[in-house]
Image (cartoon, rainbow, N blue to C red):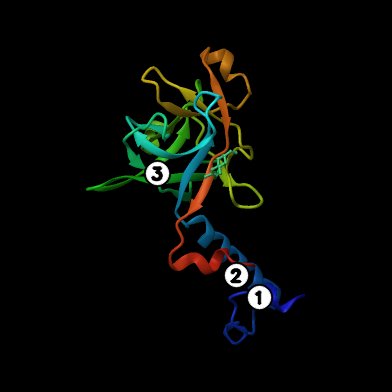
Amino acid sequence: MALSTLGLLTIGAIPTVIGVAEAIDAQKKQNQQAKERIKFKLTANFSHDDVALPQDASVVFKNKKLYLNHPACPVEGYPFNGFYFGYPGPENHQGLVAPIADDPPMLNWIYADKDTGLLRHGSRSETVGHIVGPWSWTEDEEWLTLENGQNFVAVENDEGSWNIHYDKEGNLDEILDRDIVDINLHRELQLGVSSRYTRGD
Ligand SMILES: *[C@@H]1O[C@H](CO)[C@@H](O)[C@H](O)[C@H]1NC(C)=O
């Protein structure tokens, strides 16, 4: 086993009753958890009219929905800056939470509406019956996933701005009878003290 896999482990700190393999497992678990707790912003690079070059939009909260603040159709909202957290339920899904206000500070769950796939945020009771996870990241850790896929789309709303939907079955354009645009949601890690956890492994 390569020494580099020990990562942050200090050899002298391993109690002798724990085998090195178990200690590495424990360290991996800890690293994994630290990674889940890293806050990230979300962006999507897309063209609002299929003609203009794609531009980067950032995800914001407004009226309990997730919006894309796109340069061509801006939305003023509270910026998404979320992280993963275990959703309390029998499935033990990895949930996604984010602060939705500064004063008083408050966290909400991010979920997809069971009928329209619209991404929303709310208290735990508001999420019941909807799709609450598992949220995760792609293998390269760059992109957000829900239920192990990246089936996200941008949908133009009546105000001419864009919401994010989860297109689970790939038939949302028929259900909503609207233009939809396939998007990927890029995780922009807000690296602070935790940055060392994302390097190497
Ligand atoms: C968005 O996509 C366009 C076209 O592919 C590219 O030129 C641009 O650099 C991208 N912007 C970002 C922030 O990735």
Instruction: Please state the quadrant of the image where ligand 1 appears.
Output: top right
- Determine crowd level at label 1: few under 14, some 14-19, many 20+ residues with C-alpha closer than 10 A: some
Q: In the shown orientation, is residue 47 left or right of residue 107? A: right
| Of the pair 25 and 136, the residue shown nearer to us | 136
Name the mark nearer the viewer: 2 or 3: 3
- Determine crowd level at label 2: few under 14, some 14-19, many 20+ residues with C-alpha closer than 10 A: some
From mark 1 to mark 3, how far is it between C-alphas? 34 Å
User: Which residue is the site of mark 1?
Assistant: 6
Could you say which disc has been placed on residue 129 in the image?
none
Q: Earlier in the sequence, mark 1 or mark 3?
A: 1
Name the mark nearer the viewer: 1 or 2: 1
Could you say which disc has been placed on residue 80 in the image?
3
Q: In the shown orientation, is residue 95 left or right of residue 79? A: right
SS for dot 3: loop
Looking at the picture, how far across and down is residue 147, in whole percent?
A: 60, 37
Q: Residue at position x 51%, y 23% from top?
A: 49
Could you say which disc has been placed on residue 27 in the image?
2
Q: Earlier in the sequence, mark 2 or mark 3?
A: 2
From mark 1 to mark 2, how far is it between C-alphas? 8 Å
Q: Which amino acid type is marked by label 3?
A: Phe
Q: Which amino acid type is marked by label 2?
A: Gln
Looking at the picture, how far across and down is residue 130, in whole percent?
A: 48, 29
Residue 39, above or below 23: above
Q: Residue at position x 60%, y 78% from top?
A: 9
Residue 194, above or below 94: below
Looking at the picture, how far across and down is residue 94, in whole percent?
A: 53, 46
Q: Which amino acid type is marked by label 1?
A: Leu
SS for dot 2: helix
Q: Earlier in the sequence, mark 1 or mark 2?
A: 1
- Determine crowd level at label 3: few under 14, some 14-19, many 20+ residues with C-alpha closer than 10 A: many
